Amino acid sequence: MATSVAQQWQILIYGHVQGVYFRASVKKFIQEEKLSILGFVRNHNDGSVEVCAQGKEEELERLLLYCQHGPRAARVERVEHHPQSILSSFTKFEII
């Protein structure tokens, strides 16, 4: 059962996900869907993309579904998500 209490998830996306507009498309998805998700998206040296997102569970689930395919040029092989403790509050969603 989804809850409206804020949660924080780390989402890791593996595959051909860098150099294909993945980070920008995540931010655009959040804006276009009018999700109240805060946090960041960034590339990792191993070729993966990390999303750290705070928001309501149902909105985080929508973001997770998007990350399973990403933009058209991406080839997502695997997605992991891990709940995290909320240690600090973000004030926006940004690309790092």
Image (cartoon, helix red, strand yellow):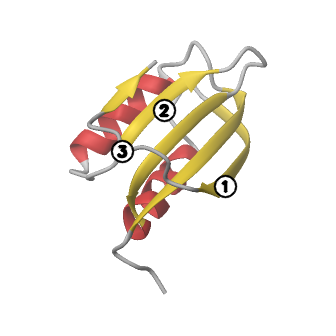
Q: Locate residue 35, reporting x and y percent.
A: 27, 53
Q: Residue at x 40, y 38 (%)?
A: 39
Name the residue tied to disc 1. 82
Q: Are marks 2 and 3 in contact (CB under 8 Å)?
A: no
Please tell me in which quadrant of the rendered image residue 77 appears: top right
Alpha carbon of mark 2 to alpha carbon of mark 1: how far?
Answer: 22 Å
Q: Residue at x 57, y 43 (%)?
A: 69
Name the residue tied to disc 3. 89
The reply to whether residue 50 is visible in this rendering is yes
Question: Along the horizontal axis of the image, is 4 left or right of 44?
Answer: left
Going by the picture, which residue comes out furthest to the bottom? Answer: 1
Q: Residue at x 44, y 32 (%)?
A: 40
Pointer 1: residues within 10 angstroms few (<14), some, or many (20+)? few
Q: Are marks 3 and 1 in contact (CB under 8 Å)?
A: no
Question: Which of the marked residues, 2 or 1, is nearer the chain's N terminus?
Answer: 2
Secondary structure, mark 2, is loop
Pointer 2: residues within 10 angstroms few (<14), some, or many (20+)? some
Question: Which of the marked residues, 3 or 1, is nearer the chain's N terminus?
Answer: 1
Disc ID at residue 71: 2
